[in-house]
Image (cartoon, grey):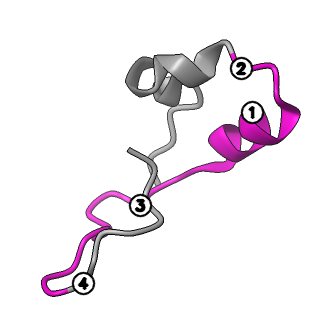
Amino acid sequence: MLKHANAWKDHFPEFAGCRDAVVAQLMEAATLLAGQPVFYPGKACENYLM
């Protein structure tokens, strides 16, 4: 598993200054496995943080 603890701050700088503990916990816990699909043909794009 690839995990770069602070990489989310580069991609989502608007959250980097957030002082909400829940947001910080969510962002620190978010991980993706290398090659893990996140979009599937024919499936609506929903519940994705963009």
- Res. 43 image quadrant: bottom left
For this view, does 41 lie left or right of residue 38? left
Distance between the Cα atoms at labels 3 and 4? Answer: 20 Å
Distance between the Cα atoms at labels 4 and 1? Answer: 29 Å
Residue closest to the far bottom: 42
Question: Residue 8 magenta-drawn?
Answer: no
> Looking at numbered disc 2 in the image, what kind of residue is underneath it?
Cys
Distance between the Cα atoms at labels 2 and 4? Answer: 31 Å
Residue under numbered circle 3: 33
- Element type where label 2 sits in the image: loop
State which tag comes first along the sequence, 3 or 4: 3
Numbered range of the magenta stretch: 18-42
For this view, does 7 lie left or right of residue 22? left
The reply to whether discs 1 and 2 touch (Cβ–Cβ < 8 Å) is yes
Which residue is found at the position 81% from the left and 19% from the top? 19
State which tag comes first along the sequence, 3 or 2: 2
Give the label on residue 43, or none. 4
Of the two numbered discs 3 and 1 in the rendering, the one whose residue sits closer to the viewer: 1
State which tag comes first along the sequence, 2 or 4: 2
As drawn, 10 above or below 3:
above
Residue under numbered circle 1: 24
- Res. 17 image quadrant: top right
- Towards the viewer: 5 or 30: 30
